Amino acid sequence: MTAEALKGHLDGLLLAVLERGPAHGYALIEALRAGSGGTFDLPTGTVYPALRRLETSGLVASTWEKGDGRQRRMYELTTAGHRHLARQRQSWRQFSGAVTAVMDGGEPAWTPST
Amino acid sequence: MTAEALKGHLDGLLLAVLERGPAHGYALIEALRAGSGGTFDLPTGTVYPALRRLETSGLVASTWEKGDGRQRRMYELTTAGHRHLARQRQSWRQFSGAVTAVMDGGEPAWTPST
DNA sequence: GACGAGCAGTAGCATTGCTACGTATGACGG
DNA sequence: CCGTCATACGTAGCAATGCTACTGCTCGTC
């Protein structure tokens, strides 16, 4: 899979995972890997900046959670995040439907061997 | 739909349309619009550079076709293009399956109204 | 003559994910 | 005590890609 395939869809994926409950960055990476059957194995340099973008956009909120010194930043969906996720799901359905239609829609009627 | 959603998938779409037979850029734009039910309404500044990339990569070949003075550049799939399209279809299936799995896979068991 | 539709193309931009790197803690083996 | 690994967070810089806005040409029509 080319690396660019993910572009524009990562936000929705992160929001979808966060919908199940708050999580920190590292856990999100593992959840995505597990939830996608190994297809998404994202480097930290992809996920952390993405989370910051989401927070800047107001779609997630973060709080520092300190166990014993191992600090981790927990993210959770905001109300706007929930709304955005709904829209993302919708547009993903439309997008994937459209791509599939074009990809599978035009099997040539004649066999190219002629 | 955010503009970035298409990134990385345009090549496959163009190849898929060209699989039905040779076509020129303008016709590809209309075929994509029709084949996607209006979802893909791509500007020329998106399609023409993409076709050049595909040609540079050796996935399509182009020939100038001159009707009466109205020149148009016809594109058709090369052998490598056919192979690439097959791979694209495969990886699209995997990618879309993975996204759908993550997007729909985690409906919360508890109702959030609690 | 003006104007739109068909047809092709480029320059520059913004966004986005990736690579490579840096930092710190706790656990475990030697 | 030291090294190393897994956990956990982060940044800088890069490359790729699609979009906006524009130009240029021909033909048909008003």
Image (cartoon, coloured by chain):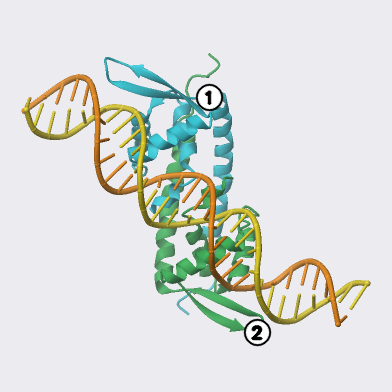
Chain colours: A green, B cyan, C yellow, D orange
Amino acid type at image mark 1: Thr
Image coordinates of residue A98 in percent, x first then y, are 42, 43
Q: What is the chain identity of the residue bearing mark 2?
A: A
Determine if marks 2 and 1 fall on one subunit.
no
- Left or right? Give the position of A85 relative to D8: left
Vertical side of B41 occupied by B102: above or below: below
Instruction: Please give the chain letter of the residue carrying mark 1.
Output: B
Crowding at mark 1 (Cα within 10 Å: few <14, some 14-19, many 20+): some
Q: Position of residue B72 (x, y in %)?
A: 34, 23
* Amino acid type at image mark 2: Gly
Q: Residue at x 43, y 23 (%)?
A: B22
**Residue at the (43%, 51%) spot, across then down:** B4
- Which residue bears the numbered disc 2? A67
Is residue A99 at least partly visible in the picture?
A: yes
Q: Horizontal placement of D1 versus A4: left or right? A: right
Residue at the disc numbered 1: B78
